[in-house]
Image (cartoon, helix red, strand yellow):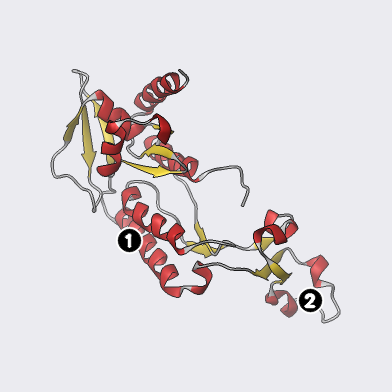
């Protein structure tokens, strides 16, 4: 969609917002030109790991809007037969030039999610499950807390990965649960974090999912930035 943001940055935004106690309003989109079923399977696998973060408001298909890349560069995305949404014909006179009057359009293109109702139903159910966690009296947490002896406590109450007792982490483990960095710069401890559901791999990056006090996040992010610049 060329909105200037990556998937990993979106996940990090959700994490940082929860850490700073900011509320977000966002939607999950589907029906992209050229999307594949495996793209959504990957998302479905991630979603239970994100239950401690703000859930989407809902699931909606993408729309081709005037001035968007899908409108101006339609052939590049495999989109043909772009036309105004049918609803415009219910509003304007029969002789109106809808091509020039309309802002929302539709077109023909290949899309796995567009032609697989089961896949869309699974996405919608996954969002329902996620939102149900936040409707409860106690929202799930995945949080790292610093102690005085340079150890860290991990509290995880997500349904799929909830741990009955807090887990003690050393500094490297805490960093692996909190920071994001290119996969090429990761070590065994980062793989451990992903295996534990404390991080995910997206856009060739290791993305930490745990929250913490903003000061602690800033401390680890600063150390990670210095290490990656060497």
Report helix, strand or loop for mark 1. helix
Q: Position of residue 90 (x, y in %)?
A: 72, 79
Give whichever of 175, 36 is nearer the camera. 36
Give whichever of 86, 32 is nearer the camera. 32
Instruction: Check disc 1: other Cα within 10 Å, few if <14, some if 14-19, many if 20+.
Output: some
> Separation of disc 1 and disc 2 at Cα?
41 Å
Q: Which is more foreground, mark 1 or mark 2?
A: 1
Q: Position of residue 104 (x, y in %)?
A: 69, 65
The extreme left residue here reads: 165
Q: Identify which residue is drawn at 35% across, 48% down.
A: 50
The residue labelled by disc 1 is 129
Q: Is residue 113 above or below residue 147?
A: below
Q: Position of residue 59 (x, y in %)?
A: 48, 62
The extreme bottom residue here reads: 94
Residue 215: give its label: none
Q: Is residue 204 visible?
A: yes
Decide if residue 159 is on the left or right side of residue 94. left
Report helix, strand or loop for mark 2. loop
Figure quadrant of residue 68: bottom right
Figure quadrant of residue 70: bottom right
- Mark 2 or mark 1, which is nearer the start of the sequence? 2
Decide if residue 107 is on the left or right side of residue 165. right
The residue labelled by disc 2 is 92
Q: Identify which residue is drawn at 51% across, 68% down.
A: 112
Q: Position of residue 100 (x, y in %)?
A: 82, 66
Decide if residue 17 is on the left or right side of residue 135. right
């Amino acid at each position: 969609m060329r909105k200037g943001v990556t998937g990993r940055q979106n996940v990090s935004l959700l994490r940082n917002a929860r850490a700073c106690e900011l509320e977000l309003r966002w939607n999950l989109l589907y029906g992209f030109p050229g999307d594949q079923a495996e793209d959504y399977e990957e998302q479905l696998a991630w979603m239970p790991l994100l239950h401690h973060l703000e859930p989407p408001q809902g699931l909606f298909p993408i729309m081709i809007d005037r001035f968007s890349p899908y409108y101006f560069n339609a052939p590049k995305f495999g989109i043909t037969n772009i036309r105004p949404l049918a609803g415009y014909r219910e509003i304007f006179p029969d002789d109106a030039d809808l091509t020039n009057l309309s802002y929302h359009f539709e077109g023909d293109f290949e899309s796995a999610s567009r032609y697989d109702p089961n896949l869309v139903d699974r996405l919608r159910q996954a969002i329902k499950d996620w939102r149900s966690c936040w409707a409860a009296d106690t929202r799930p947490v995945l949080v790292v807390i610093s102690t005085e002896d340079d150890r860290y406590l991990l509290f995880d109450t997500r349904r799929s990965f909830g741990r009955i007792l807090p887990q003690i982490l050393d500094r490297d483990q805490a960093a692996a649960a909190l920071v994001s960095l290119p996969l090429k710069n990761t070590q065994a401890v980062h793989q451990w974090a992903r295996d534990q559901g404390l991080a995910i791999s997206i856009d060739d990056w290791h993305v930490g999912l745990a929250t913490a006090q903003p000061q602690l996040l800033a401390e680890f992010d600063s150390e990670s930035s210095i290490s990656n610049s060497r």
